């Protein structure tokens, strides 16, 4: 399948703190690629670098050979890299359907303004956006909750809605930052199957930050381990699980 994402000596300093320390790795197309490590290891910063939310202090990041470092977030998103956030970022005061529709609008030709001024073409788009948004809500198990304010959703439901919002952009790559956080045991169990299902359905490559070790080990094709900003291991779940440096830095402390 080949490499779809590649980090080369990617670096991010915050003053004297090195949050991401010369990290290099390549992700294969279609993989579910896990990113684990202790709190503060630099995992979310790595996602922020990959999505343009934080500028790199050094190194490069490429998507299908195209350099993303230095590109603004909306262009990276438009290239097909979608994400969710560790601290859920849904639009407060909007329904679940509206949250998905707003994301989807950035994909249509006439966009939001066209919707407001109501040209015939935009009304057609409006209908297709609405149809697609309901489809996505069904996919994330929220078909019967579309008209409810997302503020009232449980953590697990909000996380699923946020994944739905990312899917509305037709991503090629999906970055999930702790999707199981705040979910109960049953929801965590369902999440594994759900991530596999969306990968197959949308031909996705998935990068996943997650502290819940059984979920990561059961789901990921390969796992990279960060510690104090450095990549200390990369390999299959079995390889990573028995790596002494990983056990000392992370798994042993569980
Ligand atoms: N905007 C920022 N300004 C200053 N320091 C930051 C900033 N963002 C992150 N850091 C620091 O960079 C380091 C890495 O943070 P990051 O959030 O990437 O860790 P993480 O691996 O995602 O941790 P967690 O598992 O707790 O989410 C931490 O020491 C953090 O305090
Ligand atoms: Mg984090």
Image (cartoon, rainbow, N blue to C red):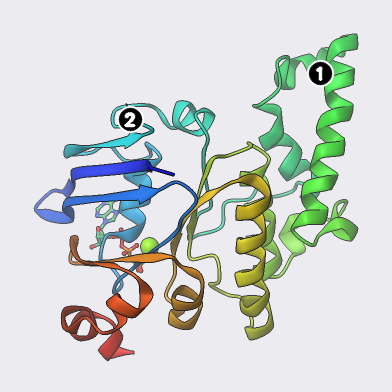
- Can you give x and y, in whole percent of width and height, for residue 132 in the image? 81, 38
Q: In the rendered view, tell whether residue 115 sits above or below residue 15.
A: above
Q: Who comes first in sequence, dot 1 or dot 2?
A: 2
- Location of the N terminus by quadrant is top left
- Residue 95 is situated, as x and y percent measured from the top left of the image, at 80, 49
Give the residue displayed 16% in from the left and 79% down from the top. 245
- What residue appears at the point 90 percent right and 10 percent down from the top-left corner? 120
Can residue 85 be seen at all in this image of the molecule? yes
Residue wearing tag 2:
65
Local crowd size for mark 2, using a 10 Å CA cut-off: few (<14), some (14–19), many (≥20): few
Quarter-of-image position of residue 207: bottom left
Is the shortest distance between ligand 1 and the CB of mark 2 under 8 Å? no
**Depicted 158 relative to depicted 23: above or below:** below
Residue situated in front as seen by the camera: 169 or 4:
4
Q: Quadrant of ligand 2?
A: bottom left
Q: Name, please, the residue furthest toward the front.
A: 1
For mark 1, give the secondary structure.
helix
Q: Is residue 119 above or below residue 214?
A: above
Q: Is 175 positioned to the left or the right of 72 in the image?
A: right
Give the residue displayed 76% in from the left and 46% down from the top. Answer: 94
Disc 1 Cβ-to-ligand 1 distance below 8 Å: no
How many numbered markers are drawn?
2
Residue 218: x and y in percent read: 50, 77
53 with respect to 83 (left or right)? left
Q: Of residues 70 and 245, which is closer to you in this image?
A: 245
Q: Answer above or below: position of 51 versus 127.
A: below
Identify the residue position indicated by label 1 in the image: 116
- Residue 66 in percent (x, y) is at 34, 27
Rounded to the nearest whole Å, what is the CA distance between mark 1 and mark 2?
38 Å
Q: What residue is drawn where x is 75% and y is 37%?
A: 101
Mark 1 vs mark 2: in front: 2
Label pair 1/2, CB-CB below 8 angstroms: no
């Amino acid at each position: 399948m080949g490499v779809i994402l590649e980090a080369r000596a990617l670096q991010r300093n915050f003053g004297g703190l090195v949050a991401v320390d010369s990290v290099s790795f390549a992700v294969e197309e279609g993989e579910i690629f896990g990113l684990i490590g202790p709190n503060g290891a630099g995992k979310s910063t790595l996602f922020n670098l990959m999505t343009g939310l934080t500028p790199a202090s050094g190194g490069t990041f490429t998507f299908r050979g195209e350099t993303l470092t230095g590109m603004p977030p909306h262009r990276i998103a438009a290239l097909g890299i979608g994400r969710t956030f560790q601290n859920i970022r849904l639009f407060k005061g909007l329904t679940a359907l509206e949250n998905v529709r707003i994301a989807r609008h950035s994909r249509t030709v006439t966009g939001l303004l066209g919707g407001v001024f109501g040209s015939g073409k935009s009304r057609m788009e409006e209908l297709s956006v609405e149809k697609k948004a309901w489809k996505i809500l069904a996919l994330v198990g929220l078909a019967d909750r579309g008209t409810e304010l997302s503020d009232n959703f449980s953590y697990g439901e909000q996380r699923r809605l946020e994944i739905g919002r990312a899917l509305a952009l037709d991503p090629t790559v999906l970055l999930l930052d702790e999707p199981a956080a705040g979910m109960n045991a049953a929801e965590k169990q369902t999440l594994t199957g759900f991530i596999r299902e969306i990968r197959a359905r949308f031909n996705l490559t998935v990068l996943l930050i997650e502290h819940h070790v059984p979920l990561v080990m059961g789901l990921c094709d390969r796992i990279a381990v960060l510690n104090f900003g450095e990549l200390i291991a990369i390999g299959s779940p079995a390889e990573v699980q028995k790596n002494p440096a990983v056990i000392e830095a992370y798994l042993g402390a569980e």
